[in-house]
Image (cartoon, grey):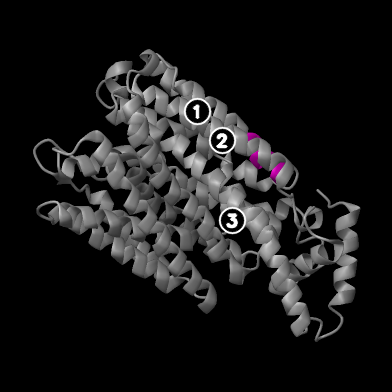
């Protein structure tokens, strides 16, 4: 597991460059900022939209439920929940291997390839005829989407320093938030296609939302760079600046060994109890996130059953937009202050307040505002936690393994989420399962550790 010779040459240049204590003068800072802006333009838009499409393709089953998916496929009992949850069985299985071997797989090509694959699978899900077909498509979709999120986190650490990571990860969060907004708007519009060419609206929903992932994957294949050293859109001197920035940020990672995958680093991550504790507590937060994404349309319907399906889809959009704004504000402040814990604690408390409003609120306004509070709390708390750990693990092997472990354990909450979180009920407006609060309160303790 060794690096190529051009990368070694860059490290030699870097060592020579850093021999001067005042290597970065004011003009060099200006050049550094120019390089950073160029990197931003070539990375952030595409990862935002690729993650947005991945979330749309995995959660549109929740919107499809409102358009008769259960009835048309003859689903009974908890079969819909099972179809929603089984996606995560294959999703979590490939997260750790994908992050560990990301450099070997060529990050840009790998991320683009899985986007093409899940887009094809998502499209054909709209043609399934029974429960077994739905389960098969969900399992395949999880297998292809699973590597994306952890690989995006590790990929960002190749290009950005610890002081820049929270805001840049905010674009991934933005993609998740946009998925709710765009997915809601698409579901609203596609609802009017019900019956077109003999197909129900839920089928059109799945068929239409798959192809954009294929197109973006093809574009990313040629547009994204694997690493700072292979960034085609930078000049040789700009690539050198980008590499030096990474070393200046974490000098422990300046050696060739630290930037290369080693078995001992992987084992060090597996043996580190702090990584396990962080990952388990992240599981409790993700129960809320996955359940919120799948069941928000159903929750809003229960707030006022008189609202039409298309109106409910439209009401999901502002919740996600608000959550993205809340995260960007917290991420910007967190990067500026280089402090994570307080923002995670505050966000977790906001999430608790939102759940109380949802359960105990009367009328329409208070429960609906509770949806906003929950969204801003859970997405901010989880986002801060995701960038916190890799910022403190400079060696590539341990960092990539830890990110995979954190997200694998956290994402496994997707299996439990359809069964244990907040549900609309026929006799009560909402039943707040105890696990809802069990998952919020440890998060407060978690960020305070």
Mainly helix, strand or loop, the magenta region?
Answer: helix
- N-terminal label among 1 and 2: 1
Q: Which mark is residue 213?
A: 2
Q: Which mark is residue 271?
A: 3
Q: Residue at x 81, y 86 (%)?
A: 21
Task: Find residue 98 and report its image quarter.
Answer: top right
- N-terminal label among 2 and 3: 2
Task: Find residue 156 and report its image quarter.
Answer: bottom right
Image vertical order of residue 25 relative to residue 180, above or below:
below
Q: Residue at x 51, y 78 (%)?
A: 337
* Label 2 CA crowd tier, 10 Å (few <14, some 14–19, many 20+): many
Distance between the Cα atoms at labels 3 and 1?
Answer: 37 Å
Magenta includes 108? Answer: yes
Between 265 and 198, the one lying in front of the other is 198
Q: Secondary structure at mark 1?
A: helix
- N-terminal label among 3 and 1: 1
Distance between the Cα atoms at labels 2 and 3?
Answer: 37 Å
Dot 3 and dot 1 residues touching (CB under 8 Å)? no
Q: Is 52 left, or right, of 350 in this rendering? A: right
Between 435 and 38, the one lying in front of the other is 38
* Label 1 CA crowd tier, 10 Å (few <14, some 14–19, many 20+): many
| Label 1 vs label 2, nearer the camera | 2
Q: Which mark is residue 373?
A: none
* Label 3 CA crowd tier, 10 Å (few <14, some 14–19, many 20+): few
Distance between the Cα atoms at labels 1 and 2?
Answer: 9 Å
Magenta extent: 107-115
Q: Residue at x 18, y 39 (%)?
A: 307
Q: Which mark is residue 122?
A: 1
Q: Residue at x 80, y 52 (%)?
A: 232
Question: If the image is split into quadrants, where does the C terminus sit?
Answer: bottom left
């Amino acid at each position: 597991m060794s690096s190529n010779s051009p990368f070694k040459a860059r490290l030699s240049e870097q060592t020579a460059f850093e021999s001067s204590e005042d290597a970065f003068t004011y003009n060099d800072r200006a050049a550094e900022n120019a390089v950073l802006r160029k990197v931003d333009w070539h990375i952030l838009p595409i990862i935002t939209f690729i993650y947005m499409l991945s979330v749309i393709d995995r959660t549109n089953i929740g919107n499809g439920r409102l358009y008769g998916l259960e009835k048309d496929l003859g689903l009974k009992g908890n079969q819909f929940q099972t179809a929603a949850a089984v996606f995560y069985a294959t999703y979590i299985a490939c997260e750790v291997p994908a992050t560990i071997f990301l450099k070997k797989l060529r990050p840009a090509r790998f991320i683009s390839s899985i986007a093409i694959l899940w887009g094809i699978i998502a499209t054909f899900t709209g043609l399934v005829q029974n429960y077994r077909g739905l389960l098969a498509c969900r399992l395949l979709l999880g297998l292809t989407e699973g590597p994306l999120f952890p690989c995006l986190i590790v990929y960002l650490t190749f290009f950005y320093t610890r002081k820049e990571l929270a805001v840049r990860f905010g674009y991934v969060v933005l993609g998740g938030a946009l998925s709710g907004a765009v997915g809601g708007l698409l579901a609203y519009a596609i609802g009017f296609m019900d019956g077109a060419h003999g197909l129900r609206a839920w089928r059109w929903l799945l068929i239409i939302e798959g192809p954009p992932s294929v197109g973006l994957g093809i574009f990313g294949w040629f547009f994204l760079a694997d690493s700072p050293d292979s960034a085609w859109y930078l000049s040789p001197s700009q690539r050198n600046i980008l590499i030096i920035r990474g070393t200046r940020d974490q000098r422990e990672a300046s050696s060739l060994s630290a930037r290369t995958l080693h078995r001992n680093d992987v084992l060090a991550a597996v043996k580190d109890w702090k990584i396990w504790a962080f990952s388990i507590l992240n599981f409790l937060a993700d129960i809320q996130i996955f359940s919120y994404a799948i069941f928000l349309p159903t929750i809003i319907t229960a707030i006022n059953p008189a609202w039409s399906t298309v109106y409910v889809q439209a009401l999901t959009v502002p919740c996600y937009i608000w959550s993205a704004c809340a995260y960007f504000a917290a991420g910007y402040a967190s990067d500026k202050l280089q402090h994570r814990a307080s923002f995670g604690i505050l966000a977790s408390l906001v999430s608790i307040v939102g759940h109380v409003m949802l359960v105990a609120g009367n009328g329409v306004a208070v429960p609906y505002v509770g949806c906003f509070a929950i969204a801003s709390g859970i997405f901010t708390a989880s986002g801060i936690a995701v960038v916190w750990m890799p910022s403190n693990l400079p060696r590539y092997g341990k960092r990539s393994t830890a990110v995979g472990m954190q997200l694998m354990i956290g994402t496994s909450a997707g299996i439990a989420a359809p069964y244990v979180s907040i549900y609309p009920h026929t006799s009560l407006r909402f039943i707040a399962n105890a696990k809802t609060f069990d998952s919020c309160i440890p998060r407060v303790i978690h960020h305070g550790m």
